[in-house]
Amino acid sequence: MDSFELSKFAGAILLALLAIVLPKTLIDMQAEQAAHSNHGPVQVGYTLPVAKQGGTQVAAAAPSAAPTGAIYDAVKPLFATVKADDGVSTFKSCIACHSGDKGGANKVGPALWGLVGRKVGGHEGFAYSESMKGKGGEWTYDRLAAFLNNPKGYVPGTKMVYNGITDPEKLAGLLAYLGTLSDAPVALPK
């Protein structure tokens, strides 16, 4: 075997190793980048259905990033200094699935105009999950904080695939912005 044949053999082995290692490396890099985006940490895989609720299988609840009251307790003091403009950049990650315009159409998720004070699971024309329809009550700032912090933990079985916002400052800004999406904006709590 001459050196040219040996070089071809070594090149073929290196190419095979590259073909095996490169896709995994690119996937890991993409997952790491997504973990640092507004969507929060990346959860690999999926949750298997584990429980029945009213005859329908529901996915297991994701572990809560923070208890409902704890996240609101962290966000509420920030309302004194937060401005609605602070939440615009965070809201940009929402517009892929939601409309924030008055009279905006439902997309993958319901339109968000008039969200604060609206019945939970009650926007006309959107097919909510049974668990969301059964939640009851209205969207208040504390309930929105808990839901947007950990959607699947607050409403197990929700159709929302968003992982949640763990940064209290970003969450406070988003809540302030969502409150302005209304003909009669709801003031932030003091």
Image (cartoon, helix red, strand yellow):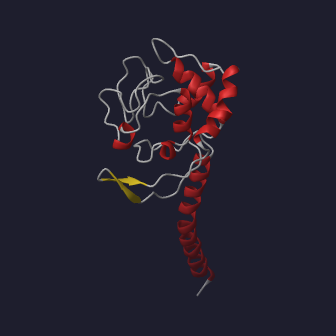
Residue 136 in the figure: left or right of residue 42: left
Q: Residue furthest top?
A: 183
Residue 140 x, y percent position in the rendering: 51, 27
Q: Nearer the viewer, residue 38 or 14?
A: 38
Q: Quadrant of residue 130?
A: top left
Q: Residue furthest bottom?
A: 1
Q: Looking at the image, which residue is at 36% across and 18% down?
A: 103
Residue 148 x, y percent position in the rendering: 53, 36
Residue 102 x, y percent position in the rendering: 41, 17
Residue 82 x, y percent position in the rendering: 67, 22
Residue 5 seen = yes
Residue 88 seen = no
Q: Is residue 10 above or below residue 134?
A: below
Q: Looking at the image, which residue is at 60% across and 85% down?
A: 2
Residue 94 in the figure: left or right of residue 29: left
Q: Nearer the viewer, residue 3 or 59?
A: 59
Q: Quadrant of residue 133?
A: top left
Quadrant containing the N terminus in the rendered view: bottom right
Quadrant containing the C terminus in the rendered view: top right
Q: Looking at the image, which residue is at 35% across and 41% down?
A: 129
Residue 2 in the figure: left or right of residue 135: right
